[in-house]
Amino acid sequence: MWRIEGARITAGLARAFGDFGLAEDAAQEALAQALVQWPVDGEPRNPAAWLTAVAKRRAVDALRRGSGLDERYAALAGELAAGHAPKLSEGSDAHAGDLVRDEVLRLVFIACHPVLGREAQVALTLRVVGGLTSEEIARLFLLPVATVQQRIVRAKKTLAAARVPFESPEPAEWPARLGAVLAVLYLVFTEGYSATSGERWMRPELANEALRLGRVLAGLVPREPEVHALVALMELQAARFPARTAADGSPVLLADQDRRRWDRAQLVRGRASLARADETARRRGRGRGPYALQAAIAECHAVAADVADTDWERIVLLYDALGAVAPNPVVELNKAVAVSMAVGPASALRLVDELAATGALAGSYLVPSVRGELLAQLGRADEARSELVTAAGLVANERARAVLLGKAAALPSA
């Protein structure tokens, strides 16, 4: 229930109280009370309403306990206690003229206020809206946990100091925030597609929420090609979900997936969104952006009957273009994987070694995991085993660790 309703409840509290920190604390306290009370008293008839009511009471109590409350907070606490404040359980209670009717998407726009830097915008939104922990966000950014925590705390304080209104911006202000909003949706989806930690290989509820918000956003800004491109990317990737895990929850990698289980309707939607992104970009005199290029790579997989049938040469070219418009070490690593399929593992290994020498992905499991795969293909089993074991020691997701250790164990002994 919390996975489904948590972000919306937090969003409603934040808008009603005008305070990210207070909203997050109150929502978490309501969850903690539910974990204690529901096993004893039973699940309430309307769990979401129960969580919302408890969170509101906790927020009011926190305001009353606070020392030196200003008049606005004191009045707000009184209104909420009397039941006169806006309903927190409704997602369509926008202020007059507000075009962003979705409660969660509205909060994303607020958190992406230009008064914050891009890094702070994304970190805060992932924490408050996406519900990701500081550890998960740190792994997504390849940063120390303390750095992420400091960004989030400073972001909350900055919004409070700037007295940022908790209403979605006017349409004229959307372009300044759109890049950060897209980045947040993409990272939330990424965490859902491949969880950075925990016992589950995927977190579909996160990915599906990011996709839902992306669809809403595409309706709000239909002339923005990268919005349609991000929706296309998420649709095409999410179409694989039914085939990405076995019955016991263990991962099924791309080469082993039964593509008949891919969601064909979702693939059609994804390709249609990519075509719309391309057409919209053409009308505006633009080429493909980073999300469109990634969606095009996903489309190459979507139309292929199997791994051998995939147009790996085209994927390499698309990664070249992606690396030019959005340089990123992960892009270069993914390109190396495509090169191994298009040309051979020896050429790919040289690319990976060059990337490793830069130290760009130091501390990440990604480089040793790819090196291990390539070394195994080259018949260098002992070196491959060492790399795969190293990667397993660096990954925080238990399912991914099991996959890496299984590959290492399957290699022939010297």
Image: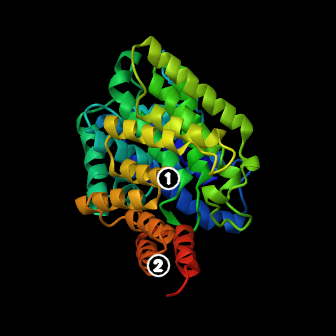
Q: Locate residue 88, reporting x and y percent.
A: 55, 37
Residue under the image location 50 percent in, 30 percent down: 229
Q: Is residue 92 left or right of residue 257?
A: left
Amino acid type, label 2: Arg
Residue marked by disc 2: 385
Query: Left or right: where does residue 261 sit relative to residue 218?
Result: right
Residue type for callout 1: Glu
In this rendering, the answer to whether 114 lies above or below 305 is above
Q: Position of residue 285 (x, y in %)?
A: 39, 14
x, y percent for residue 100: 50, 24
Residue 281 vs 267, above or below: the answer is above
Answer with the quarter of the image where residue 265 lies. Answer: top right
> What residue occupies the far bottom of the structure in this picture?
414
Q: Which residue is mark 1?
A: 191
Mark 2, other Cα within 10 Å: few <14 / some 14–19 / many ≥20 = many
Give the quarter of the image for residue 133. Answer: bottom left
Could you tell me if residue 256 is visible in this image? yes
Question: Residue 385, position in %: x, y?
Answer: 46, 78
